[in-house]
Amino acid sequence: MAKKNKSALQEKEGVSISETTNKASIAAIKQKRKTKLDSNSLVTSLLNQDITALGRAITLVESKNATHKAQANTILKACLPHANKSVRIGITGVPGVGKSTFIEALGKHLTAKGKRVAVLAIDPSSSITKGSILGDKTRMEALVKDDNAFIRPSASGDSLGGVARKTRETIILCEAAGFDVIIIETVGVGQSETTVHSMVDFFLLLKLAGAGDELQGIKRGIIEMADTIAINKADGNNLKQAKLAQVEFKRALHLYPEKASQWQPKVTLCSALENQGIEDIWNIILDYVSTTTKSKYFQHNRLQQNTFWLIQTVENQLKSNFFSTPKIKKALQEQIQLLKNNKTTPFAAADYLLRIKD
């Protein structure tokens, strides 16, 4: 009789596939994974509010594969007539302000009212490994289980300011899938705010009290874009500081000129953890939509945003085409080598590359 291998690397006897495992089911699942839906079928399923189809369509939109890009454009064109029927909300704030907790509280509040909510969470990518955690679903445990909610974390990649490259197109897909409210969460205060502001109807800035944040409220930039400032974590021992911060932010807002929308930004308190002030914020958003719709600013703003994204798309495509040209690829490496040898400057090298003809 052969001597048994006592090594820890040796697989133990008796470990096998369970007899209850249905081989036919395994084969069906594997076959389904391999199946590629054509664009028409995918659009039909998406319009019927199939979440799986929506996820597949977003994956195609985010893909850099040339074949996927063509299919994505076909799907987007078919979905466009069914879009533009939602309220788009951008939510930003410094890391630690409680964006995910707030979004979950707002999302649950809306789904309880029968609304369908899509959350597009932009997760920062590492500049070194290029990876992202994509952990927003974990932080929104209750909302992710809600049948009327859809959460899609996307890596920011190399997009300026940390906004996913195809977030704008993803909004169209979500609207076509019948979502009433689209919430976009940014990675934090920075360049991403300008980009997110250019794709939403209402921009909400979350702030903290007692964290040196009051001074930031007086600075231009982010405060000018906000349609409402919500001071989060206004509960317990922090409530008094939150109320003082509310007064300071209200004073700061009077330093700014009237917004193009003629909307006067509000300052409110909330506690996402205690689920307080959430309904007040939703009522403010409804008031904003009603006011700007009557003044026709709502549609005007969306038209301006479409124009902005047309120009951005052209610029991105020109950049992509430029760096994918074989001549440019070769010349770029040559110029980088000259830079290393201190024989040219970045500006002279750029000028040389831009003067290269096909």
Image: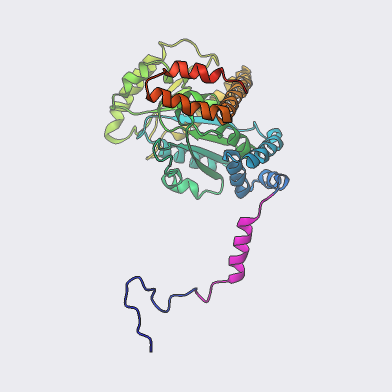
Q: Is residue 158 visible?
A: yes
Question: Residue 85 at what x, y percent from top left?
Answer: 64, 32
Instruction: Please say whether residue 30 is one of the residues in the magenta stretch.
Output: yes
> Compared to 85, does 350 lie above or below?
above
Q: Nearer the viewer, residue 58 or 303?
A: 58
Question: Residue 154 at what x, y percent from top left?
Answer: 50, 40
Q: Is residue 127 left or right of residue 299?
A: left
- Extreme left residue here? 237
| Residue beneath the point at 29% across and 27% down | 211
Q: Nearer the viewer, residue 256 or 19?
A: 19
How many numbered marks, from 0 up?
0
In the rendered image, which quarter contains the C terminus? top right
- Extreme bottom residue here? 1
Where, by quadrant of the figure, is residue 298 drawn? top right
| Residues rendered magenta in the picture | 18-37
> Compared to 291, does 119 lie above or below?
below
Question: Residue 103 at what x, y percent from top left?
Answer: 46, 37
| Residue beneath the point at 62% across and 34% down | 172
Where, by quadrant of the figure, is residue 27 drawn? bottom right
